[in-house]
Amino acid sequence: MKIAVIGAGNGGQAIAGYLAMQNYKVALYDIDECKINELKQFGGIRLEGCINGFGRLNRITTDIAETLQDAEIVMVTTIANAHKTVAQSIAPYVVDGQVIILNPGRTCGALVFKQALVEAGCTARFYLAEAQTLVYACRIVQNGTVNIIGVKDEVLLSALPSHDTDHVLRKINPLYPSFTKTTNVLRTSLENIGAMFHPCVLLFNAATIERNEVFWFYRDMTEQVASFIERFDAERLAVGRAYGLDLLGVKEWIKFAYKDTVGETLCERMRNNPAYHDIKSPSSIFTRQLTEDIPTGVLPIMELGRVAGVKTPLMESMIHICEALLCQDLRSNGRNLKNLGLVGKNKQEILNYITHEA
């Protein structure tokens, strides 16, 4: 089986290296020519940490057409802000039967991706799914070497539309048994836990980051910040209930994803999670934890809440404050209802669309 991996960042290199170690034919793509040329010299990816070994890649390229050629499964591992561009670039080369998985979709990634494919003229019968999170907690040590800090025991996955989920799982579970079926893409989207953690930690540590003072992103968390995150997260849970979903709260999710984590409170679990132990703070406030997690995470949750009549004052405040802090518009090109293709749809119409019609 041939697998295409699009995006040679932390997750992309980890997935490509692991699958190559399992003797799959893997093509790794990235737009960064310097990165790709260096990886070509190595011939593959070395993994260390929880997984150790070297995966020799079948193809390392900046050519998207040859990346997708003969690929049964396409693993998209780019940042969420790039989903639309990636969909547009692969549209001419997608063929009937290909399985495309967003790792992860963040919030409503599959909706953005499918709309972009269709608008770009793709007429193939493909299968599109999104994962709730990346299967690995990992960091690139240097280009071509990835430290696997942790491997999640379970990762929720749903197709768009959801009646395709069983087919996608039959294809991907031999590679990754941790992918688990869930209700629909609203479940994977609204379980975007990173969008709950990242902006809150960044905002309350903005001055520390700007002073270039390094801290441990998760294990330096305080009880009061953890308490705020739970209140922030309560709005996400309320949006989920409005759409008939009983979502995991942030505290419960940590135990779901990392079963060996100990602690009673959210703060204790964040401090004690070995997969998060060595993750340091970013070097700038202009980081994906704001520039990606706000427009592709917090914003669409708030927008879905608005359709369902759920008030989300903390999310709305977070967006306003971060826009002012960064001096950036995080809404216009973010995942608002227009960009999700959901303008004019009520709650039931959205549910029907993601289940049957998409």
Image (cartoon, rainbow, N blue to C red):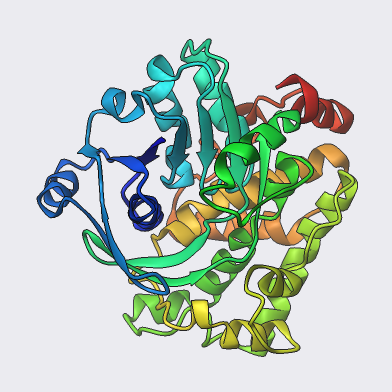
Q: Residue at x 48, y 78 (%)?
A: 217
Front residue of this view, candidates 230 and 313: 230
Q: Looking at the picture, does residue 303 appear above or below residue 200?
A: above
Location of residue 235 in the rendering, given as x and y in whole percent from the top left corner? 79, 59
* Residue at x-position 49% and y-position 13%: 122
Furthest residue toward left = 41
Q: Pinpoint residue 30: horizontal percent, then vertical percent.
A: 28, 40
Percent coordinates x, y for residue 330 in the rendering: 52, 46
Towards the viewer: 285 or 139: 139
Question: With respect to residue 245, does 139 lie above or below?
Answer: below
The residue sitting at 79% across, 23% down in the picture is 356
Q: Is residue 22 left or right of residue 44?
A: right
The image quarter in which residue 53 lies: bottom left
In this figure, what is the number of numbered marks? Answer: 0
Q: Is residue 47 visible?
A: no
Front-most of 173 and 203?
A: 173
172 is higher (above) or lower (below) than 205 = above
Residue 96 can be seen in this image: yes
Give the position of the C terminus as an image quadrant.
top right
From the viewer's perspective, tell me whether residue 23 is left or right of residue 72. left
Image position, residue 117 (x, y; %): 51, 20
